[in-house]
Each structure stands twice: as structure tokens, then as C-alpha cells.
């Protein structure tokens, strides 16, 4: 009987990602796990990963690292898939992700303008070409391997979003991973505000209001230490002229988060 196949789309070549792949592979020994490396647009070809045993060295080849783990490896940089076009709906969603990527990763503080800079135009073209390739590649691999489940980086940027849209089209289950000190797997993207709100309501359904308020206060205290957020909160609170019990602050780090709500949100002046 053929093994069930899962695809892990590798965005960042670092130790945390390798540790997460190893953990997933160990916990799902009955599953065929294939790592699809789509990091070549952003990261050096050679990564200084640590692997226990005789294979460990800074010059160890990437393929050998995964062979040591018993995981199959595909370097997406060497594949030229047949190009597949986005549907109108998929194209709209990619436009949001691409704009968010340019604003957040390449030009921090950039505001949407009627006329874009030459650099923005260049980045937009490159990201569109890259995402179409990754979308086509993902669609092709899911079909070729009859993959039932894929792992995608839990972010709102263009590359993983192209992979996610391909999985939706092919009907493959998607798990969103975060590789770091506390690696996690989620059933939904952290920027899917509607689904995250549903999960929050579900998790707190049996809690008294006092406990929910205490958790919210603790979470806010931890997040306010982030760069820029504390000053934003203070300025908004001090500028509010309405009744104190009606204070409402909607803070978002990127425009695509509001698109999830499918409402006509307007940014505060």
C-alpha cells in the first residue's frame, strides 16, 4: 500500500526549520514527507545547518542533510513547471499579498501612492513572476505525488500565499508552520482574523468574563512592548474625545489584515 504523501514548503534555510522538519518526520513515521525548497529567491544556496553525526560540517550539502533525516528533498530552483494562470479571485488575493510584501519587507513605512516608485514596480514584477512559478509548481507537485497535506509558512506574504492558494485549488489540507524557539502548527493562518476570532470565542466559551478580561489585559501588556505599538496606543488613547467606556482601537500592521473582514474599513487619519 502506497504511503500517504505530505509536502513541506521550505521558506527559510535555518536551524529552526530543520528541527521542525525532523520533528514532523519523527511524529509521522508512516507518512512520506517531501521537503520542497522554495527559499532560493531569498537565501544563500548553502546554509550552516547542524546535523549530528559524521555529516556535520559547514560544507555539508543540503541533500545529504535530508538524507540523514530520512526525508526526501526537492530543490524548486531547478524546476520549470508548466505555467498555470490564477483565477480572477486568486489574482485579487495575490495582489493583496504582493502589496503587503512590498510594504512590509522591502519598504517599511511605505504608503500606498497613486504613482509607484521604480523600485516598487520592479519588486512587484519580480514577486508576480516568482509567485506564479511557486503556484504552478505547488499545483503540479500536489497532483504528481497525490499529496493530501502540505505545510506552509504561517505568514501573510506573497510566496507562502501562492502555495496556500494552490493547495486550496487542489483540495489539499494545509497546515501553517512557525519555525522558531517554540515551533507551532496551526490549522489556519494567523492573519485570518475571522477564523482566529472564531477560535478565540470557542476557547473562551466556558470562561467567566473576569478571566477573559484578565487574559486580555495580560496579552495586551506583553504586546505593547513591540517597536512602535506602545506609542501608537498612547497617542490613540490620549486623542480619544468620546466617552471613556466606549473607547475602541483598531490597530493593524498591514492593509491585507482588514481585507479578511470583507468590510469597507477606513484607515484613521
Image (cartoon, rainbow, N blue to C red):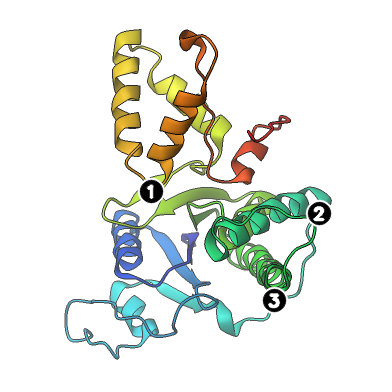
Observer-side mark, 3 or 1, equals 1
* Mark seen at residue 87: 2
Tell me the residue that label 1 is attached to: 227
Q: CA distance from mark 3 to mark 1?
A: 41 Å
Above or below for 60 versus 235: below
Local SS, label 2: loop
Cβ atoms under marks 2 and 1 closer than 8 Å:
no
Q: Residue at x 59, y 63 (%)?
A: 159
Give the class, few, some or many, for how many residues have Cα within 10 Å of label 1's Cα (few <14, many ≥20).
few
Toward the bottom, the furthest residue is 59
Give the x, y percent position of residue 215: 30, 23
Q: CA distance from mark 2 to mark 1?
A: 38 Å
Give the x, y percent position of residue 216: 35, 23
Left or right: 188 as drawn, with respect to 61: right
- Please state which of residues 239 and 206 is positioned toward the viewer in this rendering: 239
* Mark seen at residue 157: none
Tell me the residue that label 3 is attached to: 81
- Please state which of residues 255 and 227 is positioned toward the viewer in this rendering: 227
Amino acid at each position: 500500500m502506497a504511503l500517504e504523501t505530505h509536502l513541506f514548503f521550505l521558506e527559510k534555510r535555518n536551524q529552526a526549520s530543520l528541527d521542525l522538519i525532523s520533528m514532523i518526520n519523527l511524529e509521522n513515521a508512516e507518512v512520506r514527507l517531501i521537503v520542497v525548497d522554495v527559499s532560493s529567491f531569498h537565501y544563500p544556496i548553502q546554509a550552516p545547518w547542524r546535523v549530528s553525526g559524521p555529516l556535520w560540517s559547514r560544507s555539508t550539502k543540503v541533500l545529504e542533510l535530508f538524507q540523514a533525516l530520512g526525508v526526501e528533498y526537492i530543490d524548486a530552483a531547478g524546476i520549470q513547471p508548466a505555467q498555470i494562470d490564477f483565477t480572477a479571485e486568486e489574482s485579487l488575493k495575490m495582489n493583496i499579498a504582493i502589496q503587503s510584501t512590498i510594504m512590509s519587507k522591502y519598504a517599511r513605512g511605505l504608503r500606498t501612492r497613486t504613482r509607484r516608485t521604480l523600485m516598487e514596480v520592479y519588486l512587484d514584477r519580480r514577486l508576480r513572476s516568482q509567485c506564479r512559478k511557486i503556484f504552478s509548481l505547488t499545483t503540479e507537485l500536489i497532483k504528481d505525488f497525490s499529496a493530501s497535506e502540505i505545510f506552509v509558512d504561517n505568514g501573510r506574504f506573497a510566496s507562502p500565499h501562492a502555495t496556500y492558494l494552490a493547495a486550496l485549488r487542489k483540495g489539499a489540507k494545509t497546515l501553517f508552520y512557525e519555525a522558531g524557539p517554540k515551533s507551532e502548527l496551526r490549522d489556519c493562518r494567523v492573519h485570518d482574523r475571522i477564523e482566529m476570532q472564531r477560535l478565540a470565542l470557542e476557547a473562551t466559551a466556558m470562561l467567566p468574563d473576569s478571566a477573559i478580561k484578565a487574559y486580555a489585559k495580560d496579552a495586551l501588556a506583553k504586546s505593547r512592548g513591540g517597536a512602535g505599538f506602545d506609542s501608537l496606543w498612547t497617542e490613540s488613547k490620549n486623542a480619544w474625545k468620546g466617552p471613556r467606556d466606549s473607547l475602541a482601537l483598531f490597530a493593524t500592521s498591514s492593509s491585507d489584515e482588514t481585507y479578511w473582514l470583507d468590510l469597507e474599513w477606513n484607515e484613521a487619519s
